[in-house]
C-alpha cells in the first residue's frame, strides 16, 4: 500500500529512472518527501526550473533514455515551458512532472495555480492530469511509452497536491503492458516502397544522402554508414544530425543549409536523387522551397507521417523506423544483381571535390601579428585538435553555435548537443552538466557566447554542488554576434541593441561560484593557454576574446536556392 507520492517515485524506479532534475515547492513537497526516503533515484537540485528542463532534455540526448523533470505548480511549472518547447522541436523524449494545486481548488485562481496542460498543449506530444491516485502507475508508464516511441517528444503529467497525500494509501499496481488505442506508431516500412527507393538510388547519376536528427534518435548510425560506404554516396548532415556519419570521413561533405558548407549545398542543389533519412526539410535547410533542388527525385524516410511531404513533396515516401528501413534496404541491396553507375559516380565525386576546393570553410589568418584578434573558427579547430575529436560538445545558439558545428568534426552520434529547432539561448551549460552526469569519463565542453551563457549562468552553483567539471569555452565578442551579422548584411550596419556594453568579469564570476577562470586574448598564445585550461581539474570558465567583426560563412542568400550563398563579406556565388 502506497501514497500517491510514493507511487510516483516507485513508478519512476520501475521505469529505470536514474536522475530527476527539479526544484521543490509547496505543491510537490509530498513527492519530495517520498524521494527523500529512497536511494535509487538521485535528484539534481538546479537553480532555475528552465535549467532542470534543459538538463533532462540533454540527459535524454546523451543516453537515449527519457529525461525527467519535477517542478512545483504555477511559476515553477511555467519556468519549464521553454525547455519543453526545445525538446518538442528536436523530438527529444522527456516527462515533466508538474505540481498542481489541490483538485478542489482547480479553477479558483488559487495561490500558484496555472493551467499547465493548457499552457503546454501546443508543445507537448501528450499530457495527463491525475484525478485518482490509483491511476498513477498506469499514467506514468503511458507517459514514458508515448514520450519514447514513434517520433519522440515531451509529455506533461499534471499532479494536484491532494493526489499525493501521504495519509491516503492505495494498492500499487503497475501494468505489465501499455496500449493506447488512439496511438499506434508505424515501425516497419512498406517493403514495396523500400524496394522502389533502392532501385531509384541505384539508377542515380548524382545521388546524395541527406541525414537528420532522426538517425541519431533512432540509433541508426551504423546502418547509415554501411549504406553510404557500400554505394560510395556523398553524405551531408543537418545541424541535428551531426555525428550520425563520421565528420572526418572523406565521404562527408559537411553540414548543409543556411550556414552549410559550399560543397554540401551545391551537391544538394545539383543532385538527381536525394535519400533523406530522419530529416524534415526545415526552412534552415531548404531556403526557398520553390527553388529547392529542382532536378532531384526525393526519397524520404521518417517515422512521423506528418513530416513527409510537409515542406518538400516526396516522390517515394517511406514511413517507418529509420533503423528498420535501412536494414531492409541493406538486405535488398545484398540480394540485388544491380549496381550503381560507378562511372557516373566518379564524375559526380570529381565535381564535388572541385566544389570543396572553392571554399573549404576558409577564414582569415590571426597568427601573423599580435594586433590581430583571435579568430573564433581557429579556437574551435584548436579545441578539436586538443581533445582528439573525442569530446562531447554542447553549444548555445548564435555564431558560436555555427562555428562549433562547422569546425569540430563529430565522428559519433550523441557527441553534439544543441537546440536546433527552437534555437534556445541558455541551453549550453545545462546541456553540458547533464552530459557530464551521463558520461562522467568524457571531456565535456560547452561552446557559448557572452549573451547565451548569462541566461542560465546561475547553474554554476549547481555544478559546484554536484561536482560537474565541465569546461566552458566562451567565444567573447561583446555582442550578440548573429544578430549583429544580420544587421551588417541586411540593415546597413545599424546595430540596434546587439552590443553588450556592460559585461561581467567572467573569470572573477566563475571564481565567485567556486570554480576556475582563464582569460585568453592573444592569438600567439591561444593554443598553449587553451591546452593548459583544458588540463585543469574541475570546472574551468575559459573566456576567449575573439574578433568582433567576424561573420559565419557560407550563408545562404535569403529567398533563393541552395546554391545561392555568400562565401565572404564581398563574395557571392
Image (cartoon, grey):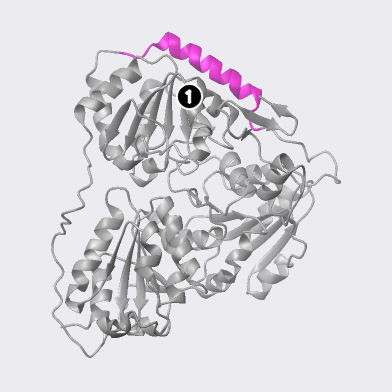
Q: What stretch is highlighted in magenta?
A: 339-361
Could one spot residue 564 in this view of the protein? yes
Image coordinates of residue 368 in percent, x first then y, are 83, 38
The residue located at (29%, 38%) in the rendering is 323
Residue 272 on image: x %, y %: 43, 18
* Residue 354 lies within the magenta run: yes
Which quadrant is the C terminus positioned in? top right
Q: Name the residue under label 1.
A: 293
Which of the 4 quarters of the picture holds residue 510?
bottom right
Would you say 411 lies left or right of 188 here? Answer: right
Let me know if residue 40 appears in the view.
Answer: no
**Residue 512 located left or right of residue 425:** right
Question: What percent of the width, then of the height, locates residue 526?
Answer: 74, 49
- Place of residue 70 in the rendered image (x, y in percent of width and height, measured from the top left): 38, 72
The residue positioned 24% from the left and 17% from the top of the image is 336
Q: Residues within 10 Å of mark 1 (few under 14, many from 20)?
A: many
On screen, 532 above or below 377? Answer: below
User: Going 67% across and 31% down the picture, which residue do you hit?
Assistant: 566
Assign the magenta stretch its main secondary structure: helix
Question: Residue 449 or 38: which is nearer the viewer?
Answer: 449
When the figure is inspected, residue 104 is found, relative to residue 326, above or below; the finding is below
Amino acid at each position: 500500500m502506497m501514497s500517491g507520492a510514493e507511487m510516483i517515485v516507485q513508478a519512476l524506479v520501475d521505469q529505470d529512472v536514474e536522475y530527476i532534475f527539479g526544484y521543490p515547492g509547496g505543491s510537490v513537497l509530498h513527492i519530495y518527501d517520498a524521494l527523500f526516503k529512497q536511494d535509487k533515484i538521485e535528484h539534481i537540485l538546479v537553480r532555475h526550473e528552465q535549467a532542470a528542463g534543459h538538463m533532462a532534455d540533454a540527459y535524454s540526448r546523451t543516453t537515449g533514455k527519457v529525461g525527467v523533470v519535477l517542478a512545483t505548480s504555477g511559476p515553477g511549472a511555467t519556468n519549464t515551458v521553454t525547455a519543453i518547447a526545445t525538446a518538442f522541436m528536436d523530438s527529444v523524449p522527456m516527462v515533466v512532472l508538474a505540481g498542481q494545486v489541490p483538485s478542489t481548488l482547480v479553477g479558483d485562481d488559487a495561490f500558484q495555480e496555472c493551467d499547465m496542460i493548457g499552457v503546454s498543449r501546443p508543445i507537448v506530444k501528450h499530457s495527463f492530469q491525475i484525478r485518482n491516485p490509483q491511476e498513477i502507475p498506469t499514467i506514468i508508464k503511458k507517459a514514458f511509452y508515448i514520450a519514447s516511441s514513434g517520433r519522440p517528444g515531451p509529455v506533461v503529467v499534471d499532479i494536484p497536491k491532494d493526489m499525493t497525500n501521504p495519509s491516503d494509501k492505495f494498492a500499487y499496481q503497475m501494468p505489465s503492458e501499455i496500449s493506447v488505442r488512439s496511438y499506434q506508431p508505424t515501425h516497419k516500412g512498406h517493403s514495396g516502397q523500400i524496394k522502389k527507393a533502392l532501385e531509384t538510388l541505384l539508377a542515380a547519376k548524382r545521388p546524395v544522402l541527406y541525414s537528420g536528427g532522426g538517425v541519431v534518435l533512432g540509433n541508426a548510425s551504423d546502418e547509415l554508414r554501411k549504406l553510404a560506404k557500400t554505394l560510395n554516396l556523398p553524405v551531408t548532415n543537418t545541424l541535428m544530425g551531426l555525428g550520425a556519419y563520421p565528420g572526418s570521413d572523406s565521404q562527408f561533405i559537411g553540414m548543409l543549409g543556411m550556414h552549410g558548407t559550399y560543397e554540401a549545398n551545391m551537391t544538394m542543389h545539383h543532385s538527381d536523387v536525394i535519400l533523406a533519412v530522419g530529416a524534415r526539410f526545415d526552412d534552415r535547410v531548404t531556403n526557398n522551397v520553390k527553388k529547392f533542388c529542382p532536378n532531384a527525385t526525393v526519397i524520404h524516410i521518417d517515422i512521423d507521417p506528418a513530416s513527409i511531404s510537409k515542406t518538400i513533396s516526396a516522390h517515394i515516401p517511406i514511413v517507418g523506423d529509420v533503423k528498420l528501413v535501412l536494414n531492409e534496404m541493406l538486405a535488398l541491396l545484398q540480394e540485388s544483381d544491380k549496381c550503381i553507375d560507378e562511372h557516373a559516380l566518379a564524375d559526380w565525386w570529381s565535381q564535388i571535390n572541385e566544389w570543396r576546393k572553392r571554399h573549404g570553410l576558409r577564414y582569415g589568418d590571426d597568427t601573423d601579428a599580435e594586433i590581430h584578434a583571435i579568430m573564433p573558427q581557429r579556437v574551435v579547430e584548436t579545441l578539436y585538435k586538443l581533445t582528439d575529436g573525442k569530446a562531447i560538445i554542447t553549444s548555445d545558439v548564435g555564431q558560436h553555435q555555427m562555428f562549433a558545428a562547422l569546425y569540430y568534426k563529430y565522428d559519433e552520434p550523441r557527441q553534439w548537443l544543441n537546440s536546433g529547432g527552437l534555437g534556445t539561448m541558455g541551453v549550453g551549460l545545462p546541456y553540458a552538466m547533464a552530459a557530464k552526469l551521463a558520461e562522467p569519463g568524457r571531456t565535456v565542453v560547452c561552446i557559448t557566447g557572452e549573451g547565451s551563457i548569462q541566461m542560465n549562468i546561475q547553474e554554476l552553483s549547481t555544478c559546484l554542488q554536484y561536482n560537474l567539471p565541465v569546461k566552458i569555452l566562451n567565444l567573447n565578442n561583446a555582442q550578440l554576434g548573429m544578430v549583429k551579422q544580420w544587421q551588417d548584411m541586411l540593415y546597413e550596419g545599424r546595430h540596434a541593441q546587439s552590443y553588450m556594453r556592460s559585461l561581467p568579469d567572467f573569470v572573477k564570476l566563475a571564481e565567485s561560484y567556486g570554480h576556475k577562470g582563464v582569460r585568453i586574448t592573444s592569438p600567439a598564445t591561444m593554443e598553449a593557454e587553451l591546452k593548459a585550461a583544458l588540463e585543469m581539474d574541475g570546472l574551468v570558465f575559459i573566456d576567449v576574446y575573439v574578433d568582433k567583426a567576424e561573420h559565419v560563412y557560407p550563408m545562404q542568400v535569403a529567398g533563393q536556392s541552395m546554391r545561392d550563398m555568400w562565401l565572404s563579406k564581398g563574395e557571392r556565388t
